[in-house]
Image (cartoon, rainbow, N blue to C red):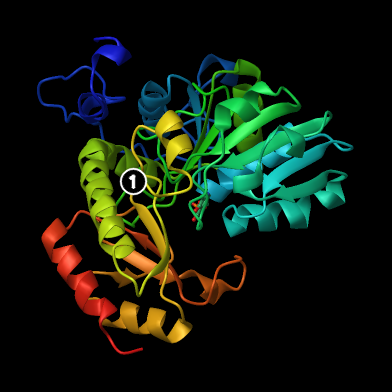
Amino acid sequence: MPRRDETGDATRVVRAGHPETEPGEPFLPGPVFAAPFHSRGDPADSPYVYTRYGNPTWERYERALGELEDAEVVLFASGMAAVAAVLFTVLEPGEAAVLPSDCYLGVRALAEQQLARRGVEVSLVATAAMDASAVSEGTGLLWLESPSNPGLDVCDIAALAQTGHARVVAVDNTFATPLGQRPLDLGADLSVTSATKHLSGHADVMMGYVATRDPGLAQSLSDWRRTAGSIPGPFEAWLAHRSLATLELRLSRGCENAAAIAELLVARDDVRGVRYPGLASDPAHELAIRQMSRFGTIVSFDLGSRERADAFLAAAELITEATSFGGVHTSAERRARWGQDEVPDGFIRLSAGCEDPADLLADIERALAAPG
Ligand SMILES: Cc1ncc(COP(=O)(O)O)c(C=O)c1O
């Protein structure tokens, strides 16, 4: 195989994790469904004794993701299962955890509900204000999310990893994907991704993973998965792996569409607070240029009121109202409907899909004119 730095993203994803081709065999072998495998004698003689301990289908997808991350990958049943594995294996009672106050609401909820009662002090700091002063000595885990969901703020991953104040630095890389940002190259210990989003890309699979170059952390994460049981299903892992081949194509189109939508929105005086790290005028742009190789498919903006945001979503024909993102279909939601993010009532988070750019832009312009 050519070395990673000699091949492009599209080339790598097409065959990532595939075995050597064999006549009469598919490029990607089908899923292996087994709870107990047939096994005799000492169970230590085989990795395949019981699927909760190991399954060849999810291991193949882990190898594929490992090729993209240049790291060991531990796959989980969902992004949140991956987040939980990190929080519960890394932190010791008496340590502190620092998290973004504006990160994905599920991560904040898990930390706030579960860590304090386990003797871990949680402090929340806004992504845009996350700097060395936010992280004191004795911090067990610094959790970063860049760009943040839903506000699209960016923090300086390399600078924060280099302060050395936190024993472990983890980055939620879900918005960027490993093709858009490589937190481990920037000095993080763990890169966490919800593969429910762009990685699988068709809004039909839940999956998550953690990538690390630290064998000790990888071992404790896979030990956690084995005992806690947060394993991916073989069929879902196979579906996600099958979708990986088109990741670069989907991302390229999605990023192109997101950039065009951001340009359209920022030029209008009836749309406020447009955020997209790829916009030259965005407050996060300079930092994003330094650490991201693609600016992502997500754009956020404020339509000024709940009524106008609802009218926009109802009028748009090519935008499906949905809370997830990263799929081939353009989707959006009025984020304040959850009541758990500090965003204005008219704030929309939009995920650009793979539709024709001209059709999408025309639909958005039309929907913006809807009375609301
Ligand atoms: C940034 C981020 N991290 C983690 C998750 C959790 O992933 P999952 O929904 O696959 O459990 C999400 C879900 O939306 C997310 O947006």
Residue 191: where, in percent of width, then height?
Answer: 53, 32
Which residue occupies the foreground of this view, 75 or 196?
Answer: 196
Q: Does residue 243 appear in the picture of this structure?
A: yes
Q: Amino acid at mark 1?
A: Ser
Which residue occupies the foreground of this view, 174 or 294?
Answer: 294
Q: Identify the residue at horizontal 41%, vertical 41% (top origin).
A: 176
Circle 1: element type = loop
Residue 364: where, in percent of width, then height?
Answer: 24, 70
In the drawing, does residue 165 fall left or right of residue 155?
A: right
Q: Identify the residue at horizontal 72%, vertical 40% (top origin).
A: 88
Q: Identify the residue at horizontal 81%, vertical 33% (top origin).
A: 136
Residue 82: where, in percent of width, then height?
Answer: 57, 42
Which quarter of the rendering shows the C terminus? Answer: bottom left
Q: How many marks?
A: 1
**Pointer 1: residues within 10 angstroms few (<14), some, or many (20+)?**
many
* Quarter occupied by residue 22: top left
Residue 231: where, in percent of width, then height?
Answer: 53, 41
**5 versus 116 height, above or below:** above
Residue at image mark 1:
200
